């Protein structure tokens, strides 16, 4: 799950940088792309956590969800990178973590398909509440936040110039 977490962190960083440095129109475009990415990533995470809970794995759902997530990551990169590129030359802006990696999605999907049977017996032997707890922990650690919950701190108000009221 490390690549999943890394891509999540990258996307959150991109959203935070955008919200602090771009115009409202660009922020809205990134919001739309992030929302699609969040939905597909959380759907894929949902498939994994549901599989833990029920100790069963649907390879066709895995294939569909992973394919969709990979496409959405690539679409995010294609749409968001041009909006973020102008920030690269601004002083004081942290390096923008784009493009988001996507090859890991296929690798994770393949790994899940090939190793599920190995873990199936262990999961089936676990108490249902233990499987539920493991799934909830996975969701808590890896679920992607809503765009509006990223970089929510208030930005400082500009100081009024000393001549502001002297017209």
Image (cartoon, helix red, strand yellow):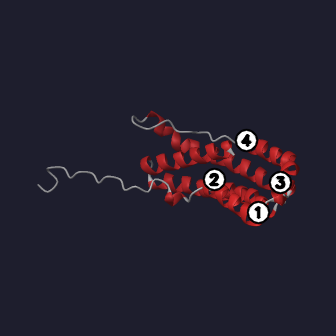
Above or below, comparing residue 92 to residue 39 in the picture: above
Pick out the residue farthest to the bottom: 129
Sequence-wise first label, 2 or 1: 1
Tell me the element at label 4: helix
Name which residue lies at 78% across and 41% down: 107
Task: Categorize mark 3 by other alpha carbons within 10 Å: few (<14), some (14-19), many (20+).
Answer: few
Marks 1 and 3, how far apart at CA: 12 Å
| Mark seen at residue 94 | none
Q: What residue sits right under mark 3 in the picture?
A: 122
Marks 1 and 4, how far apart at CA: 24 Å
Tell me the element at label 2: helix
Marks 2 and 3, how far apart at CA: 22 Å
Instruction: Tell me if residue 80 can be seen.
Output: no
Q: What residue sits right under mark 1 in the picture?
A: 53
Q: Give the foreground label among 4 and 3.
A: 3
CB under 8 Å between discs 4 and 3: no
Tell me residue 131's x, y (percent): 74, 61
Q: What residue sits right under mark 2 in the picture?
A: 142
Pick out the residue farthest to the left: 166
Q: What residue sits right under mark 4 in the picture?
A: 104
């Amino acid at each position: 799950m490390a690549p999943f977490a890394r891509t999540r962190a990258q996307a959150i960083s991109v959203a935070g940088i955008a919200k602090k440095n771009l115009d409202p129109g660009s922020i809205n475009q990134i919001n739309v792309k992030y929302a699609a990415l969040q939905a597909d990533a959380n759907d894929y995470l949902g498939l994994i956590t549901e599989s833990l809970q029920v100790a069963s794995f649907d390879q066709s759902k895995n294939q569909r969800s992973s394919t969709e997530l990979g496409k959405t990551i690539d679409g995010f990169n294609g749409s968001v990178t041009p909006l973020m590129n102008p920030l690269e030359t601004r002083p004081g802006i942290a390096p923008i973590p784009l493009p988001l990696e996507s090859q890991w999605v296929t690798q994770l999907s393949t790994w899940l398909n090939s190793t599920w049977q190995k873990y199936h017996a262990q999961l089936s032997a676990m108490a249902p509440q233990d499987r539920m707890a493991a799934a909830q922990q996975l969701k808590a650690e890896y679920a992607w936040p809503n765009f509006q919950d990223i970089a929510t701190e208030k930005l400082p108000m500009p100081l009024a110039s000393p001549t502001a009221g002297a017209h």
